Amino acid sequence: MNDTISKIDNKYIDNVAMSAEDNKIKDSECNDKNYTFEILEDNKEETKDEEFILNATFPKIEDNIVNNGEIVVTSVLDFGENECLQGMKINLYKINGLSPVLITSKITDKDGKVVFSEVEEGCYRIIEIVDKRYFEKPKYISWNEIIIDGVNKNQKLTIVNRIKSCV
């Protein structure tokens, strides 16, 4: 582990790069959110006639970067000029093995849109809930499964609905 520390508790160390391999760190630990370091006695910094001892925990830099994405879903009625459908229920599922898990549901606004923001990286499925007495099965353009990752942060999906013909 090689990390550069620049500020801890309002005290500064000028770009001290340390690793357990170079015998400057007594103990280091890394979990999902933090790094913890303790410097060996021989490597403590001297600042203005007082010894600076680093034994601190601080957040990983990559955890401060927002890695979440956004999915914008538009529901339209396939009738002439694809009229936007307000009031349609859209479910967002996280695909987790065999059974998708419902994350949240939203209702489309006057523009036929819902926005799922702060979506974590992963695979998702979008399902529109329709009244089957009046609507055919919705069609998803391009598909109702979406991946949010480092490359695909912002995804758009259009759902096309058709009114059932009277028989």
Image (cartoon, helix red, strand yellow):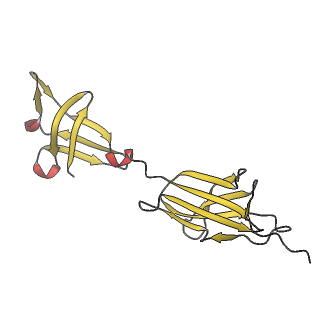
What x and y, as percent, mark residue 137? Answer: 75, 72
What x and y, as percent, mark residue 2? Answer: 20, 50
Residue sitting at x 12%, y 44%: 24
Residue sitting at x 10%, y 22%: 48
Residue sitting at x 20%, y 31%: 12
Considering depth in this image, is 156 or 50 the residue closer to the camera? 156
Q: How many tags in the picture?
A: 0
Asked which quadrant contains residue 42, the reply is top left
Asked which quadrant contains residue 129, the reply is bottom right
Compared to residue 15, the image places residue 132 above or below, namely: below
| Quarter of the picture holding the C terminus | bottom right
Furthest-front residue in view?
81
What x and y, as percent, mark residue 98? Answer: 58, 71
Considering depth in this image, is 159 or 11 the residue closer to the camera? 159
| Left or right of 68 in this view: 129 | right
| Left or right of 164 in this view: 43 | left
Furthest-top residue in view?
49
Furthest-bottom residue in view?
167
Asked which quadrant contains residue 84, the reply is bottom right
What x and y, as percent, mark residue 117? Answer: 55, 50
Furthest-right residue in view?
167
Compared to residue 69, the image places residue 16 above or below, namely: above
| Left or right of 157 in this view: 17 | left
Considering depth in this image, is 62 or 26 the residue closer to the camera? 62
Compared to residue 90, the image places residue 132 above or below, namely: below
Considering depth in this image, is 133 or 84 the residue closer to the camera? 84
